[in-house]
Amino acid sequence: MNKILVTTDFSSNSKAAIRFAIQLASQHAYHLTFFHSTNLDRPTSWSKAIYESHENSETAQTLNQLQGFVKEVYNSLGRLATNFDCVVRNNAATDQNIMQHAEENGYSFICLSKNGENKSGKWFGSNTATLIKKSNTPVIAVPSNYQAGKITKVAYATDLKHFDSELEKVLDFTAPLGVQIELLHFTNPADALMEPAQKEAITRNINEHQLISHFETFNMEKTLIENMNEAFQKSKPSMVVMFTEQNRSLFEKIFSSSISAEYASVSEIPLLVFSK
């Protein structure tokens, strides 16, 4: 069974990721794990045994709080709180804590709200950008105002550079949900360098998988983010899928240092980011 690690800091904003994950699990058999990262300092005067006792006590209390927090969200959606578990893990580096737990336990996705604030006052948005840039586990960034609704259409934004391998991942995600895929591509100088065989393969895949394709002319008077937002306002997808090469892709070299992370910071649509 595919598993999703859903992070929360107990803020109202962080409930958006929980709502989205619950919706996703209602459309496919995902197992949900709700995760909270703590940072418990060890006073220099404490022995290892005293600190471990304190850590165990605090973790147990926080775990109980996490379970109650998650159940409240389930109840608010009128959903039965089943097929999930909760994890509290102590580490000073929140983003590293999330990535490590996801990789060690084979999660398919990390899901988090992009504007939550944790107890230390650090905005979760910075964690979102870090995870998108560094995580080997695909990241779902959910706007803090997200309200649960059936996922019916997924927009796939691509530079076409690795279209075959990207599309395979997109299909693996969307096929169990039974949703429509809309491909969005902005023409750029690299298109002229594409081999005829590659163009034929792209056309064949579009037809075979019945993708709705939008090949748009890039408006040079606007940023890439503005161009994308205009396209998505017209098509109104339930979520967006993008790919990022953590050493920067051609798409990113032309338009931005990290377009996926930048788009996640402003998107009003849930965004799933795969690493290339």
Image (cartoon, rainbow, N blue to C red):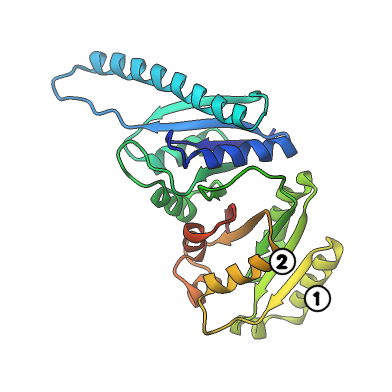
The answer to which of 59 and 91 lies nearer the viewer is 59
Residue 264, x across and y down, in percent:
51, 57
For numbered disc 2, what is the local secondary structure?
strand
Q: Amino acid at mark 2?
A: Leu
Instruction: Using the rendered view, name the quadrant where residue 237 is placed.
Output: bottom right
The answer to which of 56 and 237 lies nearer the viewer is 237
Instruction: Using the rendered view, name the quadrant where residue 203 is placed.
Output: bottom right
79 relative to 172, above or below: above
Mark 2 or 1: the one toward you: 2
Q: Say which residue label 2 marks.
A: 183
Q: Amino acid at mark 1?
A: Glu
For the point 72% across and 34% down, the residue is 29
Quote the CA–CA distance across marks 2 and 1. Answer: 16 Å
For the point 64% across and 66% down, the residue is 233
Q: Is residue 176 left or right of residue 73?
A: right
- Can residue 23 be seen here? The reply is yes
For the point 54% across and 72% down, the residue is 226
Residue 34, x across and y down, in percent:
53, 31
Q: Is residue 116 left or right of residue 112?
A: left
Q: Quadrant of the C terminus?
A: bottom right
51 relative to 3, above or below: above
Q: Say which residue label 1 marks.
A: 200
Q: Quadrant of the N terminus?
A: top right
